[in-house]
Image (spheres, rainbow, N blue to C red):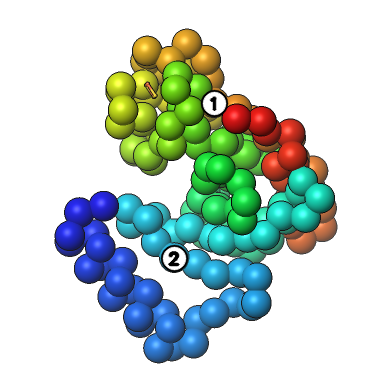
Amino acid sequence: MDRRDFLKCSGKACAGIGLGLVLNSYLLQSCAGGLSVLKLNQEAGWVNVPLNQLEKTGFLMIRVKDFPFEIGVQKKEEGGFLALVLMCPHANQPLTKAGSGYICTLHGSRFAKNGSLLKGPSTAPLFELPLKMEADHISIQTGAFKA
Ligand code: FES
């Protein structure tokens, strides 16, 4: 994050706090690189993502307490949802959202929005977490991931 992004993000955070936009006790939003990040807690290896958080853009970055990487949750074109661990499989580095996909800034691997590998040196796609659809949320099995 450069200085401009930091100032933008800080300004948004201050404005959000000033307006009292805290959603509830376990749900907070912040920004990272201009993207909204939803912070959630997991319980017994599962995290619940409210569906209304995905209504606007069909994409959401979540940060789960005690989970080592952010998770990208998105609506699939063919229906349903996808939850990807945003870790580069090459050397377990965090990924950055780039356009509709992801990039690893360490050695340059690129991944499509569905997690498939576009460019190495990574030789593996992104790890997809199992999920279950519920009436008003998606349950994502964070416990299925071992770094
Ligand atoms: S760690 Fe991502 S390309 Fe090497």
Q: Amino acid at mark 1?
A: Leu
| Residue at the image point whose x is 31% and y is 28% from the top | 106
Which numbered tag is attached to residue 126?
1
Which numbered tag is attached to residue 136?
none
| CB at disc 2 and ligand 1 closer than 8 Å | no
Q: Amino acid at mark 2?
A: Ser
Instruction: Give the distance between the C-alpha atoms of the residues marked 1 and 2, in whole angstroms.
Output: 24 Å
Q: Residue 7: name its quadrant.
A: bottom left
Q: Which residue is mark 2?
A: 30
| CB at disc 1 and ligand 1 closer than 8 Å | no
Left or right: residue 35 versus residue 126 is left
Q: Is residue 106 above or below residue 1?
A: above
Q: Is residue 117 above or below residue 88?
A: above
Front residue of 82 and 1: 1
Under tag 2, what secondary structure?
strand
Front residue of 129 and 67: 67
x, y (%) of residue 125? 53, 20
Front residue of 73 and 13: 13
